Amino acid sequence: MRKLAIVGIATAAIATSAWAIEPGNWETNSRLADLQLPADMPPQAADMMRQIMGGEGMTAQNCITQDDIDNSPERIFEETNGECRYTEFEMSGGEIHAVAQCESDEGTMDMTMDGTYTASTYDMTMSMRGNMGMGPMTMTFDVTGRRLGDCG
């Protein structure tokens, strides 16, 4: 699964509740915290995978409009070309919990997001596990976000 899709999911997931966050320009930082790969994966392939998914992490900005906030959580997965679907989504009292299944040409992943939010920040852990064609794997990301100001 592409790193940009992961960041997009996290950013938009926070923007799905009218009482949750303020619309505006949001910055999301996503950093790989843990990667468990199949035991039989060649060491060179495992190292390459860690380098691709890890490193400096990824930062993205996204304009979240009031219209985005007012729509259902499923709308955010338009950014992943419809590859992901929520089976659970709760966002209230400063806490967020979501579960989704993501399917792509490479395979299937189950995703869980848990964390906290305010009107202008969020901090969560996103765990993904499944098989992307190389065997079973698990990825855990630390994801933070903050509102930078108005879109523009």
Image (cartoon, rainbow, N blue to C red):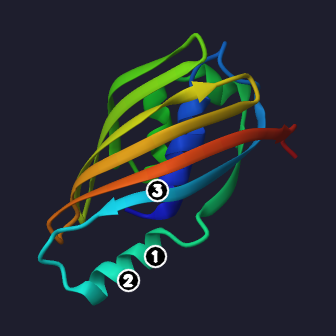
What residue occupies the far bottom of the structure in this picture? 44
3 or 1: tag closer to the N-terminus: 3
Q: Are marks 3 and 2 in contact (CB under 8 Å)?
A: no
Q: CA distance from mark 3 to mark 1?
A: 13 Å
Foreground residue among 90 and 144: 144
Q: Amino acid at mark 2?
A: Met
Residue 92 at x, y percent in the picture: 55, 12
Residue 82 vertical placement versus 124 (above, below): below
Q: Which labelled disc corresponds to residue 33?
A: 3
Instruction: Pick whichever, 78 or 32, lies toward us.
Output: 32
Quadrant in the rendering for residue 87: top left
Residue 106 location in percent, x, y?
24, 66
Q: Nearer the viewer, mark 3 or mark 2?
A: 3
Residue depicted at 61% across the width and 62% down the height? 58
Give the residue number, with chain letter if any, for mark 2.
48
* Mark 1 neighbour density, 10 Å: few (under 14) some (14–19) many (20 or more): some
Return the disc, 3 or 2, that comes first in the chain's sequence.
3
> Which residue does the numbered mark 1 point to in the structure image?
52
For mark 1, give the secondary structure.
helix
